[in-house]
Every structure is written in C-alpha cells, then in structure tokens.
Amino acid sequence: MQPTALAVPHADREVDTRGLNCPLPILRAKKVLAEMASGEVLRVVATDPGSIRDFKAFARQSSNELLAQDSRDGEFIHYLRRR
C-alpha cells in the first residue's frame, strides 16, 4: 500500500497496537473510542497488514468515520472520527 496523499488529520488520542494481530487492534480502538467525545479523532498505529481491511470494515459496522489510512516502514496508521 502506498502512502496516502491526504493531509494528516489532527488526533485527539492515540492507540499503539504494534505487535498485536486481529482482533486486538480493533478491540483496543473500540475501547478508546467509547471513552471519546463525538467528533474527536483517534490515531491507531498497527503492524498487522490485515488492519487496513479490518479498520475499513470496523468503520462501516460502527458508523465511526475512517478519515485516512497510511503505511510506512511496516506500520499501518488509521485515523477514525468518533461518531
């Protein structure tokens, strides 16, 4: 996956899920999103390549907005806006 050309959104919170595989990155993100206010942005850093498709599906199912996804140096970064 090539890095996105989108501007990097401002993140209110961050979750580091490096070294964790599905479903743990999603579960960690879900827990933090539940603690956030509507409209706040969560940045999730993962090393699981499957997290790209997992966060797309999670955003559809949870009605949280997937703002951007990026990858660099073996890390996958996801930005989600709390519904």
Image (cartoon, helix red, strand yellow):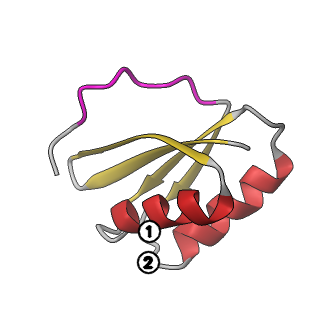
Question: Which residue extends farthest left?
Answer: 2
Residue identifier under label 2 = 21
Span colored in magenta: 4-11
x then y, percent, for residue 3:
21, 38
Q: Identify the mark at residue 54; answer none if there is no mark.
A: 1
Residue 52 falls in image quadrant: bottom left
Q: Looking at numbered disc 2 in the image, what kind of residue is underneath it?
A: Asn
Residue 58 falls in image quadrant: bottom right
Query: Which secondary structure dominates the residues rendered in magenta?
Result: loop
Residue at 75% over, 62% down: 31
| Quadrant into which the C terminus falls | top right
Asked if 54 appears above or below 15 in the picture, the reply is below
| N-terminal label among 2 and 1 | 2
Q: Is residue 36 left or right of residue 40?
A: right
Q: Dot 1, crowdedness within 10 Å: few (<14), some or many (≥20)?
A: some
Helix, strand or loop at label 2? It is: loop
